[in-house]
Image (cartoon, rainbow, N blue to C red):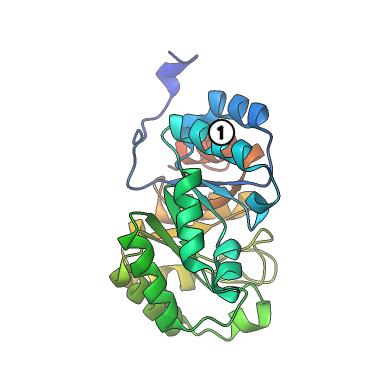
């Protein structure tokens, strides 16, 4: 029972196929993470151990955090940067095995920081799927100049190919800044013409939009809907994002 529950708008309950929220863990301690999930875990669907941060912390602690998150019905995975590092060092098989031993149930495959050919990326997606992982792949480059060189048609083609290869969700690169990259202009505003062109060709439920900033979260909820998939959400913004989805903030009240 929630307080003022008679005012709470409905939303799809977990496990969800849409309206997913992916949260970025940048190094929370186990107790802090567990306390956060006790109050907000029902609003989190995917939990990313950011970049290569899981390498820096004790393996048993990472295992305990993974198990704790999964107890709240949350899929866990490492950042795509870790997979790219494995690719550079020819350690892909080892990463699959280590991920299984730790308990991760998902894998992110990206080529945002390295020159990984698209054919290789598609092959890795298929391999991850064959290893039993929920697969997320990311389209876009972390280098702003390189990302801007990707045409809209190339972006759409890449999304289609990665879905066909077995990707369960395709992440649209937005980084932590949410500026000058992907669907965002230099000020961090959403380029709605680009978004609309993408969802005109791709099932929106197959896309997870990295949206680190509140204005982006509001814009995507208002223009795509309450059940848009949002990613790179800060641990401090979980409740805020759910409030935006439910029309419990001034930006979306009466509009969702």
Residue drawn where x is 54% and y is 65% of the image: 83
Q: As rendered, which of 29 and 159 lies closer to the eye? A: 29
Q: Position of residue 20 (x, y in %)?
A: 42, 46
Q: Position of residue 136 (x, y in %)?
A: 43, 60
Q: How many marks?
A: 1
Tell whether 93 sits left or right of 13.
right
Residue drawn where x is 32% and y is 73% of the image: 201
Q: Quadrant of the C terminus?
A: top left
Tell whether 141 sits left or right of 17.
right
- Position of residue 160 relative to residue 69, above or below, is below
Question: Which residue is labeled 1 in the image?
Answer: 64
Residue drawn where x is 33% and y is 54% of the image: 132
Q: As rendered, which of 198 and 101 lies closer to the eye? A: 101
Q: Quadrant of the N terminus?
A: top left
Q: Position of residue 218 (x, y in %)?
A: 55, 49
Residue 36, quarter of picture: top right
- Position of residue 10 relative to residue 97, above or below, is above
């Amino acid at each position: 029972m929630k307080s003022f529950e008679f005012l709470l708008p409905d939303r799809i309950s977990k496990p969800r196929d849409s309206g997913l929220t992916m949260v970025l863990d940048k190094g929370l301690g186990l107790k802090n993470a567990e306390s956060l999930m006790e109050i907000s875990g029902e609003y989190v669907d995917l939990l990313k151990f950011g970049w290569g941060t899981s390498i820096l912390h004790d393996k048993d602690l990472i295992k305990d955090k993974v198990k704790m998150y999964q107890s709240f019905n949350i899929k866990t995975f490492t950042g795509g940067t870790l997979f790219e590092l494995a690719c550079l060092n020819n350690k892909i098989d080892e990463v699959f095995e280590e991920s299984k031993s730790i308990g991760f149930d998902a894998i992110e495959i990206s080529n945002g920081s390295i020159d990984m050919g698209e054919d290789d990326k598609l092959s890795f997606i298929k391999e991850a799927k064959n290893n039993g992982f929920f697969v997320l792949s990311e389209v876009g480059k972390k280098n702003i100049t390189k990302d801007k060189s990707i045409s809209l048609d190339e972006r759409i083609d890449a999304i289609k190919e990665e879905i066909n290869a077995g990707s369960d969700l395709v992440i649209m690169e937005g980084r932590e800044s949410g500026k000058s990259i992907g669907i965002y202009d230099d000020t961090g505003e959403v380029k709605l013409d680009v978004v609309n062109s993408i969802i005109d060709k791709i099932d929106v439920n197959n896309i997870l939009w990295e949206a680190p900033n509140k204005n982006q979260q509001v814009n995507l909820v208002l223009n795509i809907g309450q059940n848009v998939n949002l990613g790179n959400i800060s641990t401090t913004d979980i409740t805020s994002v759910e409030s935006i989805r439910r029309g419990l903030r001034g930006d979306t009240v009466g509009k969702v």
